[in-house]
Amino acid sequence: MRIPEPRGPISGTLLDVLAGAPAGPAEALAGLRELTLNRLAETADIIGDDDAQLALFCLYELHYSGLDGVTDAWEWDAGLIQVRQALEKPFEAALRAAAGDAAGELDLPAAADLTSDAVADVLFSLAGRDTGPSVSRYVARKASLDQLKELLIHKSVYQLKEADPHTWAIPRLSGRAKAALVEIQADEYGGGRPDRMHSALFARTMRGLGMDDSYGAYIDTVPAVSLAAVNLMSLCGLNRRLRGAIIGHLAIYEMTSSQPNRFYGNGFRRHGFDAGVTHYFDEHVEADAVHEQIAGRDLAGGLVEAEPELLDDVLFGATAVMAIDIRLSAHLLESWENGRSSLRAAMPVAA
């Protein structure tokens, strides 16, 4: 991915450090860590902090496709991992607080009754909650063409590498849960056909609207909460202790995806776009209706049956994504209904 524009002292200093080699002076990393800790101590809302979220996003990106001009040798540099952990700790604390608010009162089964079906029932109950105004319904009925493009920009930060954060969990599972995750991920990756990978279908949708479909093309325009939504996945996917959380995240994703994607597809059809553009959304209407059962019962339920102590983490992952989604949806709708862009800056011209 291309190097983004810094958004403050943490991301700016981080990108300066990454421009060099890990064998450089240790003082630079020590200074970056101290700067990060001092800056975070003054931050009241890390989820909405552009500087912190961009820095964390760039650090995580070293484990995915990397950053242009940055050596891969940085990926597991011990000093840089310390900087990442300095950002992760308050981010996770904020996510847990937001997740607790989103969870409310949950009717949990007794420890002796933690069957896969019982776990799935809890997750389906969460997924069925009314979480407020719906972006997908707004898109279906009212969104302008420019707003459709903005929607794709927000989604592109994850959708152009769809499934990758959840794939980190495969070697961390076993038995029924592992088999279920591999089954879901195989569909996400197109069943072996590159043109049917969900990330490829999303790129096709972007091209259909005359947009740049290269990964990270719009990174400078998305607000902190859009980055936080992806950083949540990377946090849970890259830390083995949070394997339950990444499974809960995926389960609720699959359980809440089918109907919104139907509405999204209708919104694009309302503007005259054909199946070449709507295929991405139409594919998810069908695929996620099947995946939700696998994700709820075999994946999340199977994991908790095998490791009952992970129930709390599964629920954390599920409620955290709901909390971030509520916040992002509120931002989008408040912006659009008041005639403003939901982006940080004007959209760049398509490549």
Image (cartoon, rainbow, N blue to C red):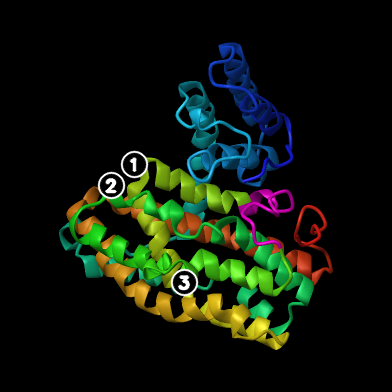
Residue 83: x and y in percent read: 54, 27
Q: On the rendered structure, is 168 left or right of 345?
A: left
Count neighbours of disc 1 (C-alpha within 10 A) and say few if under 14, some if 14 to 19, many if 20 or more.
Answer: some
The amino acid type found where label 3 is placed reads Arg
Q: Please give left or right for residue 64 compared with residue 70 in the image.
A: left
Compared with 10, 314 (above or below) is below
What's the magenta bit mostly, secondary-structure-wise?
loop
Task: Report if the CB atoms under discs 3 and 1 are less than 8 Å apart.
Answer: no
Front-most of 48 and 12?
12
Q: From this viewpoint, is residue 6 visible? A: yes
Q: Residue 151 in the image: state x and y as whole percent.
A: 68, 67
The stretch drawn in magenta includes residue 291: no
Q: What element carries label 2?
A: helix
Q: In this view, does 122 lie to the left or right of 261?
A: left
Going by the numbered disc 2, the residue's amino acid type is Arg
Q: Name the residue under label 1.
A: 240
Residue that carries the numbered disc 3 in the rendered image: 196
Q: Residue at x 62, y 28 (%)?
A: 18
Foreground tag (3 vs 1): 3
* Amino acid under disc 1: Arg
Is label 3 in a helix, a strand or a loop? helix
Please provide the residue range marked out in magenta: 212-226
- Up-down: is 276 above or below 331? below
Residue 250 is left or right of residue 333, and the answer is left
Q: Do the residues labelled 2 and 1 touch (CB within 8 Å)?
A: yes
In three-dimensional space, the C-alpha distance between marks 2 and 1, rounded to whole angstroms, equals 7 Å
Q: Mark 2 points at which residue?
A: 172
Residue 220 falls within the magenta-colored stretch: yes
Label 1 sits on a secondary structure element that is: helix
The residue positioned 58% from the left and 22% from the top of the image is 21
Position of residue 287 relative to residue 295, above or below, is below
